[in-house]
Image (cartoon, helix red, strand yellow):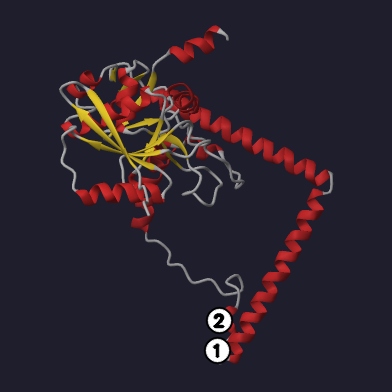
Amino acid sequence: MSSSTRDDDERPIPLRVANQKAYVWDVEDVARIRSKYRLCGILAGTLPHLSQQNVFLGIPLVLLPEEVVLLVEQGAAILIDDPAAHKPPSPAQIAQWHAEQTESMKTQLAGIESKNAKESQGGGRALSEEAQRKRKEREERKRAAKAAKALAEGEEASVFTPASEAAPAPVASPSKTEERESSAATPSNTKESSSFFPFQQTSSSATPHTIVVPAPSSSLPWYDPSSCSYSTIDAARAAGVWSYPATLEERARCGVFKSLWEQGYFMGIGIKFGGEYLVYPGDPLRYHSHFTATVLEAPTTTLRPMEIVAHGRLGTATKKAHLLCGWDDDKKEVSYLSIEWAGFG
């Protein structure tokens, strides 16, 4: 293993916090969190060119609050106040960003023109013209069908006359006052527009191109997290960036999560199965969960008989055992009790 790879594995993972939620934007950090620290999180971003955006998701990775606390306590991650890390860009930085966008656009257009030239030399242009001819024939057939339908319904066929054949509407000539106002406003507007979008002025081609927006903010020259990074939960809480855990219930969830994690389990969200967590013996991509865990704020928490029956039947119906996890806030320990439906008789 090279020294650079070893340094990347040892550096703290930046967790970018906004509105009390922690996000991971780097793909390598996402893989490291899952493979080395056995934490899954939830992918919440969309993937380009995929129609079903609710099935396959991408970065950013949103971490559970318990996962965030665990990573920071293990010294594996730091919390970054992401809104505060985005400093106002200087004019030089804006100009550099526009220059990079312009260069990217020119490179794309040059590649498209080169591809079109090769296709025209190799017969690709003839196929394109054939496709255009067929499309034109289809449009003409559709237009004729619409006209026939309109005649059958008693409407005038002139409604479907193409707009290009219609006489253009008269345009009122502007008054001298309007001309003076337009001539006075145009230079300043053009200058203001060109200062923000100079690449629009250099592009006279109608060929579509892609504007690349980097996912991690760390690649932006005006992004500086040095003054708003926190290596402990207490420091982030004092700065108002992070507040979890703040109650007994939240401390119990963090304690139970850490206890199960230390035993080698993977955890996922268990709300669909009537608990706080789903407990997996290995990576959820390879294994089914064995337990549905419910967090109790104290080992002496009162449970109604109907709750015990419901947990047992629900766990058995989903081929899992229900795990009751009692957190002792004084001893910082967890006691476990599993429930399964015996099915006597």
Count of all numbered marks drawn on residues in the image: 2
Disc 2 on helix, strand or loop? Answer: helix
Instruction: Identify which residue, 313 or 145, lies in the foreground.
Output: 313
Amino acid identity at mark 2: Val
Locate residue 328, reporting x and y percent: 19, 27
Give the residue at x 73% y 38%: 114
Q: Which residue was labeled with disc 2?
A: 159
Q: Considering only vertical position in the picture, is 43 above or below 264? A: below
Location of residue 338 (image quadrant): top left
| Disc 2 packing (10 Å; few <14; some 14–19; many ≥20) | few
Residue 86 visible (yes or no):
no
**Image point (57%, 8%), residue name:** 2
Q: Nearer the viewer, residue 132 or 82?
A: 82
Q: Quadrant of residue 152?
A: bottom right
Q: Which mark is residue 268?
A: none
Spatial CA span between label 2 and label 1: 8 Å
Q: Quick check: 34 above or below 340?
A: above
Which residue type carries mark 1?
Glu
- Point 35% across, 44% down: residue: 340
Instruction: Between residue 120 and residue 243, name the one nearer to us.
Output: 243
Residue at the far front: name it: 345
Q: Is residue 175 visible?
A: yes
Left or right position of 169 against 142: left
Image quarter (top left, top right, bottom left or bottom right) of the N terminus:
top right
Q: What residue would you read off at disc 1?
A: 155
Above or below, 266 relative to 133: above
Q: Tell me residue 168's x, y (percent).
A: 53, 71
Does residue 193 appear to the left or right of 150 in the view shown?
left
Do the residues bearing badges 2 and 1 touch, measured as CB atoms within 8 Å? Answer: yes
Residue drawn at x 35%, y 56% is 178
| Residue placed most toward the observer, 273 or 66 | 273
